[in-house]
Amino acid sequence: MNMMPSNPMIPASPKRLDDLGLPKVMMMDLLLKTMFRKSLEQAMSHLILPPTLLDQLDPAVSSGRSMLMYGPPGNGKSSISNGIRNSMNDLIYVPNALEYAGQVITVFDPVLHSPVEDLMDSNSLRKRDTYDRRYVRCQRPTVITGGELSLSMLDLIYDHKARTYQASMQMKATGGIFIIDDLGRQAEPPQAIVNRWIVPLEEQRDFLALNSGEKFEVPFDTLVIFSTNFHPNKIFDQAALRRIFYKVKIDGPSKQDFLKIFALVARAKGIEMDQAGLVHLIRNKFPTIGNVFANYQPTFLLDQIKTICDFESIPYRMTPDLVDRAWANLFVEDEEIVR
């Protein structure tokens, strides 16, 4: 293999792909990993969630199978995804690069991977080399994509200047979580995106291609979380839904949970809770939208109130007048605009 040592862009001594043997140092080994409910509860302790939701999430995460979270916007699907990531607080070893058929594929990405400092030997000023230095010890990666996701991002990307390949997004997420947020907002239809994942989701392996057209197999050991504001039946056919193992609906909070969230956010922002303002909000404002509560609303409304108080140099308080002014920015009324 020609390593082209004169090119500083190529990592030294990449690991041969056919020598990896599905390396456990990189793999998440999700099917063997035990995910205790306590770990999830600790990672999501800052969120107010219905108790039945953890009953759904726990087996989904423990199994390492794909998951679809759906429901109205602004109710914490992204926060729940991050909580799942935080519950997996151990470390993995990511190869700097891999070599296949004489081609170098860069895997480690400083934007997506968070290296962890090596331990110092207590009897020496030097760091201990306790593992193969062709790997980087990292926290489990979380790759988050949204409306910008395209199918081309799931393929190898060739760098003509460096004469190397960049690993695909899902390959960089190996050992961690791949979150496809805002599914249905991409240029490609959701059905096409899920179709690309059929083999990886079912067989825990993926197939990538070099520019020459040669295809090769790579391990697929990633927890894939799809998140959408659309109803699944409107964007998928039944064959696609069958391949997504868990479907979890994330609804808005109850009135009781909404009030708890509101109190927590107000306390964090240093805004005094005014009973008249809160009663005005619940009795007069929310009935105009059918009493539909969402998790994002407390933060949005209280940020508006805080900004108004700062501008007018008045104490932070939640008065009925300030509630009205903040509410006016929460929604846009349907109306015809004369041109």
Image: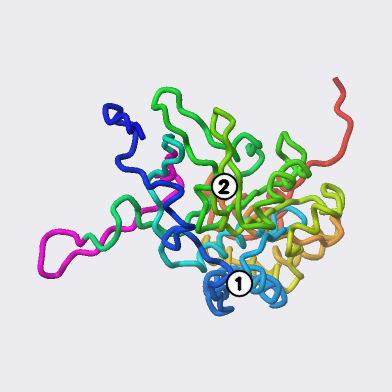
Which residues are drawn in magenta? Answer: 105-128
Name the kind of residue labelled 2 in the image: Glu
The numbered disc on residue 217 is: 2
In the rendered structure, are the residues bearing label 1 and label 2 in contact, judged by CB atoms less than 8 Å apart? no
Q: Position of residue 113 (x, y in %)?
A: 43, 50
Q: Judging from the image, what secondary structure is the residue with disc 1 in?
A: helix
On screen, residue 332 versus residue 47, left or right, reads right
How many numbered marks appear?
Answer: 2
- Rendering quarter of residue 62: bottom right
Q: Which mark is residue 75?
A: none
In terms of secondary structure, where does tag 2 sit? Answer: strand
Q: Amino acid at mark 1?
A: Ser
Colour option used:
rainbow
User: Is the residue 29 above or below the residue 325 in the image?
Assistant: below
Location of the C terminus by quadrant is top right
Q: Is residue 103 magenta?
A: no
Image quarter for residue 333? top right
Q: In the drawing, does residue 11 fall left or right of residue 222?
A: left
Counting from the top left corner in percent of width and height, residue 271 is at: 56, 62
**x, y percent for residue 75:** 70, 59
Q: Earlier in the sequence, mark 1 or mark 2?
A: 1
Q: Viewer-proximal residue, 268 or 240?
A: 240
Q: Is residue 280 left or right of residue 7?
A: right
| Badge 2: residue crowd in 10 Å (few <14, some 14–19, many ≥20) | few
Residue that appears at 33% across and 33% down: 3
In the image, residue 275 sits, relative to residue 132, either above or below, namely: below
Residue 29 point in image, percent of width and height: 52, 66
